[in-house]
Amino acid sequence: MKVIHEEGSRPIKLWTDDIEEGALQQLKNAAKLPFIAKNGIAAMPDVHWGIGATIGSVIATTRAIIPSAVGVDIGCGMVAVRTSLTASHLPDSLLDLRNQIERNIPLGPGGRHNGDAILSKHFDRLPRGDKRWGLPLILGAAGDEGGKRAASQLGTLGSGNHFIEICLDEAQAVWVMLHSGSRGTGNIIGRQFMETAKVQCERYFIQLPDRDLAYLVNGTQEFEDYISAVSWCQDYAMENRRVMMETVLAALECRVKPFTLTMNAIQCHHNYVERENHFGQNVYVTRKGAIRARVGDLGIIPGSMGQRSYIVEGLGNPESYCSCSHGAGRAMGRKEARKRFTVADLEAQTAGVECRKDDAVLDEIPSSYKDIDVVMANQKDLVKVLHTLKAVCCVKGA
């Protein structure tokens, strides 16, 4: 761990030397804010520049919350299950399985389910919300009064770095792992509160090192509304992953054979806010591209399409606010990846993985991400590895 502590700022604790200047400046800007907890900001080994706030950052605050430090894909995270299947049970080609998953789970930014029966079923699975922000208020705020968008996007993947994978572990056991968040509803709510924070700061002439670091003050109606809305989005994201996992497991059973699950599902958010106690102080912890890793917490740290992924157990390191990385982290932007690599490069780097190998997913090529082995080596004091997974089939939203 490396510590940067500039005068007039809270300390920044880094679990890597591999950080671009833009991301470091974002962290330095956040560290200047007066409500950052005294133990500062933690930057995970997959840290990189992000829109609004740094991805791979853990920010503890005492009297306010920065909505951009959670982002717009509120509750984005992972779920993984281990099955009783082994590599020997899988067919030689996984193309039919991939095709069925892609048929059954809507993909892409506008992906959604259709039909009254499935929408009614999914509406019943929507989180109800809390006393402050119940379901009708949430849907109204998202411009979705009837809940059609939220219901239709429950059980859908999205795009970008979201994925579904069939993996093998070191014992050749078959795992299913997927990555997604709160879809369009979470995006709308996240953007609304980021804008609300900017309006609030401008109203009271608050000078910020970066306008994207606008915040909501504890005790205000806007702050309390944000806490309730974010909680709903986090629950929605988790239910979205549950619905998709049910669909993938049904496809796997159809294409392979009946099986059982040999351990409970591992679920972890990596874009969220939680009230926690650290260093004897009650704080709000925002994790953007980081997962909680208290002692005994199980987590998922995925690599990219051709790299390894890891099932980990938290070590509860207090310096990181009991957190670890959420993945490998991007080494370059999507435009740069498209300039630098070709479809032939993608084919070579995903050899042995049943997945799309075309221009639509070129910006997800493994080399556009940091080396997951280096990322894991940099956080040996944050987690221990329980299982190492290798993808054999990958579905992307494009």
Image: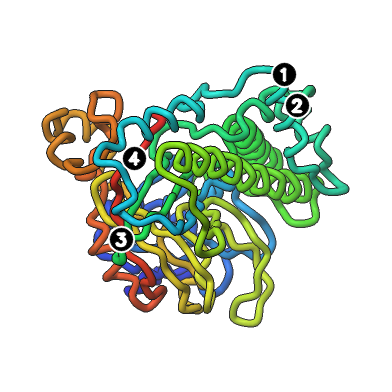
Q: Residue at x 55, y 57 (%)?
A: 267
Q: CA distance from mark 2 to mark 4?
A: 30 Å
Disc 1 residue type (three-letter): Asp
Indicate the amino acid at tag 2: Ser
Q: Which marked residue is nearer to the observer: mark 2 or mark 3?
A: 3
Residue of label 1: 116
Q: Secondary structure at mark 1?
A: helix
Residue 130 pos. (x, y %): 83, 48
- Does residue 193 lie above or below 370 as drawn? above
Q: Earlier in the sequence, mark 2 or mark 3?
A: 2
Q: Residue at x 55, y 58 (%)?
A: 265
Q: Tell me the distance, in whole angstroms, between the alpha carbons under discs 1 and 2.
A: 6 Å
Percent across and percent down for residue 301 are 39, 59
Query: Helix, strand or loop at disc 3?
Result: loop
C-alpha distance separating marks 3 and 1: 41 Å
Q: Earlier in the sequence, mark 3 or mark 1?
A: 1
Is residue 340 depicted above or below 324 in this figure?
above
Residue at x 43% of width, y 66% of height: 324
Q: Residue furthest right?
A: 131
Mark carried by residue 394:
4
Query: Residue 120's mark?
Result: 2
The three-letter code of the residue at mark 4 reads: Cys
For residue 172, which numbered disc appears in the image?
3
Circle nearer the N terminus (2, 4): 2
Lower sequence index among marks 3 and 4 = 3
